[in-house]
Image (spheres, coloured by chain):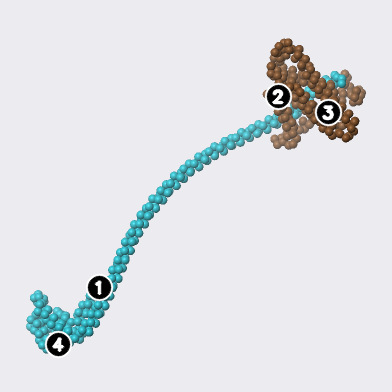
Amino acid sequence: MESHGAQGHWVLTLGPLEIGWEVLTTWLIMALLGLGSWLLTRRFTDDPGRLQTMTEGIISVIEGAIEAVLPGHTWRVLPFVGTLWIFLTVANLIGLVPGLDSPTTEISVTGALAILVFMSVHWFGIRSEGLWGYLKHYVSPSPLLLPFHIIGEITRTLALAVRLFGNIMSMENAALIILMVMGFLAPIPILMLHIIEALVQTYIFGMLALIFIAGAISSQGKPSSRREP
Amino acid sequence: MELNWSTFILEIINFLVLVWILKRFLYRPVLEAIEARKNRIAQEKQQIDALKEETERLNRETQNKKNLWEEEKEQRHHALIEEIAAERESLMEQLHTELEQERRRQENLDRARRAEINRKMEAQALRQGGRFVSRLLERLACPELEARQIELLMEELHRLPPEKARTIQTAMEEDGGDIKVFSGFTIPGETREQLSEILQQVAGPARVSFHKDESLLSGVSVHVGYWVLEANLKDEMKFFMDIVDDEH
């Protein structure tokens, strides 16, 4: 029932399912976020304290960012995009905790998130425009562009997954190499670099997902003004 | 870098579960709290706006009332000034009238005071003149003066009007026919005869007797019954003193 994975992590097997350290770490993150959210929000008052103010500030920032890109659809998109930002922030930074690795260093995790973004784009697009109205944009302005639209959907999803995986994995490997070469002379700058990189990749992933969704919702000849970085 | 399908599927499920958890326990409570606070702030702002509007309305009303009060105050101020001016004019006229009356009264008083002083001075002058004349006549009293007075008396008796003479005659008849002649000095015999003759001519036949009365100083006093004829200094001095007393 138990075995070692390729990288030396413990892996549980439940029938056909293999529960790797990534899933366990994700569950840990889910437990932390869920429990933290419940503890924070159950004591909300009209006179907010520091934690309530901070929580409301974070959610307000996310809401403001979504409202700026997709006005009028904030509440529809906020749970998905906000969860992406919150989860990726914690998942990217949890590697700083000794004994834990970031789940986003695994292509299976980032691929799953990218697939979710891919699916959510169609989900929100169909809910907003209807199935026929949404599918029409693949053949507009000309049916000749349909293959290119399909290729674009696949490549941007793949790029989304590989970008996050590659950056987080390479950053951790680079940090490990630097620590091995320079010992403990430069741990703090490397940790700072880790934090910045994690936050930047979180922002990029969430913002790209938001832009893709916004493009699907207002896809009929109204491409988003933002470009993929 | 290899794709683990179990991890891939579980991560999809995990993320969807996380979306539900956060939506249920984070986004909804936070957004509801923010919305509730926004609503409360909006209500408070609405109340504040209403209060502000009410305050502005009250301010406008207060300003209008203040303006009205200012106008009314200005009007009353003008009316009061005019009333004070009229009252002052009236009081000034009244004061001028009273001053004029007082001036006239003072002038009358001055005139009366001056008249009284003049009268007193005249009386004093008369008294002094009377005393002077009395002393002078006392010093001038002598038999020669008396003789001259008797001569004057006899001349007067000669010119006596008839009705006066009848009065003397009537008085003598009522008294019994006696004529008394008083003199300051002793009258000489010849003069006595002349005087008796003239008196009898005037009063009719009568007994004429002569008496000495030094209080007469000089001259004679003829008594015919109730009728008395004075021609002496005492009577003259009495005349002057009576004048002084009458002046008082």
Q: Is residue A43 visible?
A: no
Going by the numbered disc 3, the residue's amino acid type is Leu
Element carrying mark 1: helix
Q: Which residue is mark 3?
A: A28
Q: Are marks 1 and 4 on the same chain?
A: yes
User: Which chain, by letter, is cyan?
Assistant: B
Q: Of label 1 and label 4, which has the lower sequence position?
A: 4
Going by the numbered disc 1, the residue's amino acid type is Glu
Give residue B113's position: percent from left, percent from top: 31, 68
Q: Residues within 10 Å of mark 3 (few under 14, many from 20)?
A: few
Residue occupying the point 71% across, 14% down = A137
CB under 8 Å between discs 4 and 2: no
Chain letter of mark 1 equals B
Find chain A in the image and tell me its colour: brown
Q: Is residue B89 visible?
A: yes
Give residue B61's position: percent from left, percent from top: 52, 39
B7 sits to left or right of B178: right
Residue occupying the point 33% across, 60% down = B101
The disc placed on residue B187 is: 4
In the rendered image, which quarter contains the N terminus of chain B? top right
Q: Which residue is mark 2?
A: A69
Q: CA distance from mark 3 to mark 1?
A: 151 Å
Element carrying mark 4: loop
CB under 8 Å between discs 3 and 2: no
Q: Residues within 10 Å of mark 1 (few under 14, many from 20)?
A: some
Q: Which residue is mark 1?
A: B247
Mark 4 vs mark 2, foreground winner is 2
Going by the numbered disc 2, the residue's amino acid type is Val
